[in-house]
Image: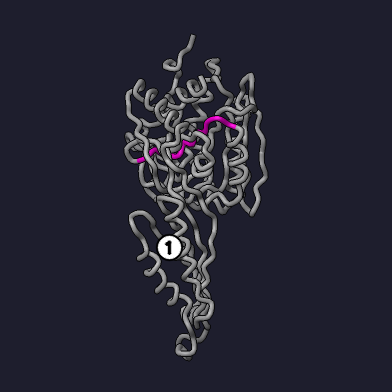
Amino acid sequence: MTTLHDLPFDTDEMLAGLRPWIETESPTFDAAAVNRMMDLVQHELAALGAITERIPGRMGLGDSVRAAIPHPRAGEGGILLLGHLDTVHPVGTLAKLPFRREGGICYGPGLMDMKGGNYVYLDALRKLLAAGIETPLPVTVLFTPDEEIGTPSTRELIETEAKRHKYILVPEPARPDGGAVIGRYAIARFNLQTRGRPSHAGWQLDKGRSAIAKMARVVGEIEGMTTEDCTFSLGVFHAGQWVNCVSSVCDAEVLTMAKTQELLEEGVAKMLALNDPEAEVIMEVRRGVTRPVWEPDQPGTMAMLSLAQEIAAEIGFEVSGASAGGGSDGNFTGALGIPTLDSIGVRGADLHTLNEHILVDSLVERAHLATGLFCRLGA
């Protein structure tokens, strides 16, 4: 009889399976591209014998895929494997960051965040099914299209699905020390717009009021509000088309992250206080999507961490647990009080950059962790 330790995980096979996932580029704002990725994964889930469901996208974003893995109680509440298939990398990034292996490192857009982890946990289910090993609890998979922009279109779907389950596994990339996440900071996004007065920059410069200049001054003010417990970062800035025109409109986006909900609300108040509708150059601040704080040390989550640590020790590595910034969909499930173990995916570095990569050794390592969790949660 095949045991968990006998499951035939093979690094080269896993990399070969991952390649089409990475080469199917899927930036959040390109719904057609995201849906091509959903097509690929839905096909793989169907090939496992899973009962798959395509959930149409909304808000101009891509679809979601939900799948009940074969089990005598398939479809019932048990373990939810929750992940996103969108990335921050635009189509064409492969020209600069091709999928490639160099020794113990493998590169590719979205490989670390979070296609690598999603693939590993799906491969773990594939190997368990092939070996005829039945998990104590049925497993449901939910892959979504919009985590990288705060999950505006699928939060309700995630929360509704999560409430049916006892445990949530989120294979986001591991923390820098290889550890898991057992709580996450609160996050809010803001849309900013300055509106000035246009003029010809060479002929009547003094008649104009620059929206760009106003926004630029505010950027320093916003980022200057950052503390160790509440951070502010302006990451998007759009304005101007003609250099000989004084800009009349400038748009920007700001991300605020805080260690507690109270600190987040204080940060929100500071941002909204920047509204200035009566000035010569109007400043408008609108609050966007928010991720609630996921408080650490919840008993159910800590029990999951303890189990993960036992499994990791048997495999030969360590898994620490800590609260972290950088939101994920685990914010939603953890905030609901559902036992959630996050950042249990691959190890790597430089996510969201043109050097995004994973440590190849972490593929098999995390696959064994995944099978242990699937087979011992609820046992």
Classed neighbour count for the residue bearing mark 1: other residues with Cα under 10 Å, few (<14), some (14–19), many (≥20): some
Q: Nearer the viewer, residue 182 or 90?
A: 182
* Part of the protein shown in magenta: 165-175
What secondary structure do most residues of the magenta stretch adopt? loop
Specify whether 83 is left or right of 179.
Answer: right
Disc 1 element: strand
Task: Please tell me whether residue 10 is drawn above or below residue 248 in the rendered image.
Answer: above
**Residue 174 within the segment the image draws in magenta:** yes
Q: Looking at the picture, which amino acid does disc 1 mark?
A: Leu
In the figure, residue 345 lies in which quadrant? top left
Q: Residue 342: percent from the left, percent from the top?
A: 45, 37
Residue 24 visible: no
Could one spot residue 304 in this view of the protein? yes
Residue at (54, 20) in percent of width and height = 135
Q: Is residue 43 above or below residue 9?
A: below
Q: Which residue is mark 1?
A: 234
Position in image of residue 302 (x %, y %): 42, 32
The stretch drawn in magenta includes residue 152: no
